Amino acid sequence: MLLEVRDLHVEFRTRDGIAKAVNGVTYAVDEGETLAVLGESGSGKSVTAQAVMGILDMPPGRITGGEILFKGRDLLTLKKDERRAVRGAEMAMIFQDALSSLNPVLSVGDQLGEMFVVHRGMSRKDARAKAVELMDRVRIPAARERVKQYPHQFSGGMRQRIMIAMALALEPALIIADEPTTALDVTVQAQVMDLLAELQREYRMGLILITHDLGVVADVADRIAVMYAGRIVESAPVHDIYKAPAHPYTRGLLDSIPRLDQKGQELYAIKGLPPNLMRIPPGCPFHPRCPMAQDVCRTDVPPLYEVSGTRGSACHFWRECLHA
Amino acid sequence: MPEQPYEPEGAIAGTGMGGAMDLGASEAVSLEKTPGGPDGTGPADKPRSLWSDAWRDLRRNPVFIISVLVILFLVFISLWPGAITSGSPLKCDLAKAQQGSGPGAPFGYNGQGCNVYTRTVYGARTSVTVGVLATLGVAVLGSVLGGLAGFFSGSWDSLLSRITDIFFAIPVVLGGLVLLSVVTSNTVWPVIGFMVLLGWPQISRIARGSVITAQQNDYVQAARALGASNSRLLLRHIAPNAVAPVIVVATIALGTYIALEATLSYLGVGLKPPSVSWGIDISAASPYVRNAPHALLWPSGALAVTVLAFIMLGDAVRDALDPKLR
Amino acid sequence: MPEPILEVDGLVKHYPLTQGVLFKKQIGAVKAVDGVDFALGRGETLGIVGESGCGKSTVAKMLVHLERPTAGVIRYKGEDVTKLSGRALKAVRRNIQMVFQDPYTSLNPRMTVGDIIGEPYEIHPEVAPKGDRRRRVQELLDVVGLNPEYINRYPHQFSGGQRQRIGIARGLALRPEVIVADEPVSALDVSVQAQVINLLAGLQKEFDLSYVFIAHDLSIVRHISDRVGVMYLGRIVEIGTDEQIYDHPTHPYTQALLSAVPVPDPEAREHRERIILAGDVPSPTNIPSGCRFRTRCFKARERCAQEVPLLAVPEAFRGAAGPAVHPSACHFAEEKQVVPPETDPGGDRFLPPADGPGRSA
């Protein structure tokens, strides 16, 4: 396994108390695999990724337990400078907002080239050439001319391509993309997603795709992990989950999205709101919103039951859900 | 941060059945109407305005408590200096000149044989008066002019911006030396007037910027779409959301105005003897600093502590009002 | 279409670009909206879709008089309301209200929920006598599915979905006939989106509202709209009923837009054709000659650069009948099915166990 997260726990101290953002997340990504981590805001999907990247704000954040194994080494036990060496060179991150992730006073060529100057000790001239090559790679037209331009001179889609180029620069083994296309228009979204998937295949990288959009995930992911209240509630190969979800939350999410090919009468809506992370309900955190909840759900936290060799569901009634 | 699981927005989310899904479903609606769910009865569920949140933060901040205690003490002695002193700050005995501390004069005597303790206490009145009135004048004039310019924009705004630029170009001390040297009145008013004249552009710029920012919020558009008048937009929607930076800057400026008054008095263009001011005393004591350092130390120490107290207060208020923490 | 309550004719909004400090000289214009026509029937929902920068939000702002049109006419019940001011404008405003996109910036953080929802009554005191207002506000909270006891709380104590409900309650306070909703659910989580959409649909029936529903998400627009207009670079390029637009699109832009929508079904990707558009949307300061879509169009020919296509039933379809016959601003309009026909018809919506035929089949 390229990356294994085991029983990760993260808390945030706030003025109103302790928010338990991640409560025992376990997932793994292999080379050449795409894992989609799906969840709503507050589900802990981004916090987990930030912990993996080592860019969690601490304080207020605090990792209270678990392991993050990258190529067999536990990243949480590394020293700061060892960790920094891993970041960028071996794993890279793509953010949602490309404009604020790029430095507005440096040309994109300088920013791309900097990676090679800092990590590879290249001369500025060679680094510039590398930058052009990378921009070609992510199919920015007229890369040679545009390498001298500044981030604001590029459109949203092109900026996201530059972000991808930057993440790819040192050919990392793992890329984490946090909502990479959420800020983009649909027509551009498709282009960027296709590019990302293609490059991932080409470099055989592991890709963690963090998103709230079930549609985007369906096209590119191999596996899906659904998060709710800081836990993985369902994990399965992509085809299985869309065909027959084994957790009522996943099922509710799938049913609540309006579909392009049909005009529904009334949308199914999951009742209630995501839980307050300072007061996560006892038992199964989803029980107050779950149409299948029984007494046991209010008292016992469901473990991740094995549904089959490749999928798991944290629901006491996964069988009923699967065959509902 | 793309995801903020710990933001206080979730406060009511804990009431379980936060939103009724469907108007027809009476069960859902009745659940929704139950005040306070299983875990929603905590104090977080009381109405909490942003001001009360800020006040809650302030009360817990030691910097705020210390600075407020110092300021309250200063206000007290400027209102009733007689409560902790006896005798007049103008009663001087040359025979006691430069003497160290003695009975009734814990801080000793200055070059003219005046009681340093009494003069330092009475000096607070000048400082606090000048500081408070100058700040009030600056804040009112600056926020009205800047706020209106930001709200109405257009040519008035351009005109005001050029005027503030002109005022920013005037060096404060040089301007004070020139303007105040022609004034003969030995009261605090010319000094306050000068400070308001030179100080308002600073507040005006901040008020203009913060009005422009507040105006871009959708709630202002929403009120406009309802047909709200300009005065309602300004007073009810924009001003309450734009006032925080003005308060912070004005508080910090209050300290600097006190320092400026002392500076001008030191240079001989602010207040002149027989008025009592820390600046005058510092100026008078500086030639004898080798023989009677206490005469310099006490008024300048009082000045430093006062200015620091206001700057600390401003910082604490800024931290409490900073919307980014919310 | 039922009798129109709102008609828009040749609506234009240009923002001048100026140069110079003292003597400002106009050097161009951002053509945000460049000639938009549509009509909204009573009780109907018109969806307007388009990508960012297509001018859909500017149209919304003009409908609620937050922006004055550069040219064109907005008729409310047959009367031109674009030139109104003062009392007459205020009266029209009562009837056309707006729901905003961002539930975080659309509520004044210094006001209680009661003050926010009650403000419409302070601005229009004739609607409700003073003593009656509190009761009305509580009723509104109830209508949008919030606890009426929350009246004294502040917006920051609510979640995004709850805030959006508060915004909707404010929009309803004056009992308007038309509600313009600008991306009302795009800032919300998936599970909460459905709640708010259902709420909007329920309110429409209850209060006989007409909606202009603006969004970039084509699936949501289809769900809620009776008719749909597709905007590109300041103009509507195709308009028709939801069936006409989604199942029988004739404009290449609509087709590309529909084909790009990610569908939450990994099986579907095999039998779907994607139309990937080249390049980016041109700047609204420099709109291409002829057809404004031609720079990205996969069908563009000579004629497209010279002749502006009008929004009308295309020549090729004249005299024909069927769902493909609807206004489409393209010289080479041609029907093309991009959304695969319904694979799994309604009825397997998730209900408590023992219900429903099941999805695993």
Image: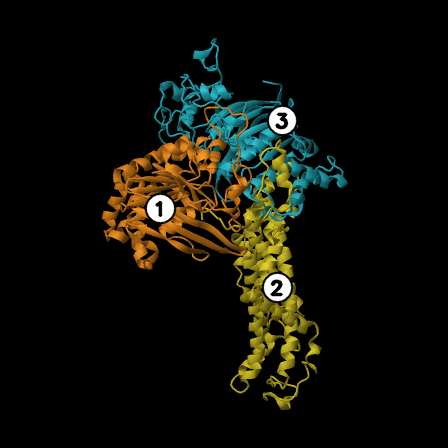
Chain colours: A orange, B yellow, C cyan
Marks 1 and 2, Cα distance to the nearest angstrom?
56 Å
Task: Name the residue carrying label 3.
Answer: C205
**How many other residues sit within 10 Å of disc 3, few (<14), some (14-19) or many (≥20)?**
few
Observer able to see residue B198: no
Q: Are marks 1 and 2 on the same chain?
A: no
Q: Amino acid at mark 1?
A: Met
Marks 3 and 1, Cα distance to the nearest angstrom?
47 Å
Q: Amino acid at mark 3?
A: Lys
Front one among C50 and B310: C50
Q: Name the chain under label 3.
A: C
Q: Name the chain under label 2.
A: B
Observer able to see residue B245: yes
Relative image position of residue A58 (x, y in whole percent): 43, 57
Relative image position of residue C193 (x, y in whole percent): 52, 35
Name the disc covering residue A93, or none. 1
Quadrant of the frame with the N terminus of chain C? top right
The local secondary structure at tag 3 comes to helix
Relative image position of residue B317 (x, y in whole percent): 57, 60
Q: Quadrant of residue A198?
A: top left
Quadrant of the frame with the C terminus of chain C? top left
**How many other residues sit within 10 Å of disc 1, few (<14), some (14-19) or many (≥20)?**
many
Marks 3 and 2, Cα distance to the nearest angstrom?
65 Å
User: Are circles 3 and 1 on residues that touch, CB within 8 Å?
Assistant: no
From the image, state whether disc 3 or disc 1 is nearer to you.
3
User: Are circles 1 and 2 on residues that touch, CB within 8 Å?
Assistant: no
Task: Name the residue carrying label 2.
Answer: B194
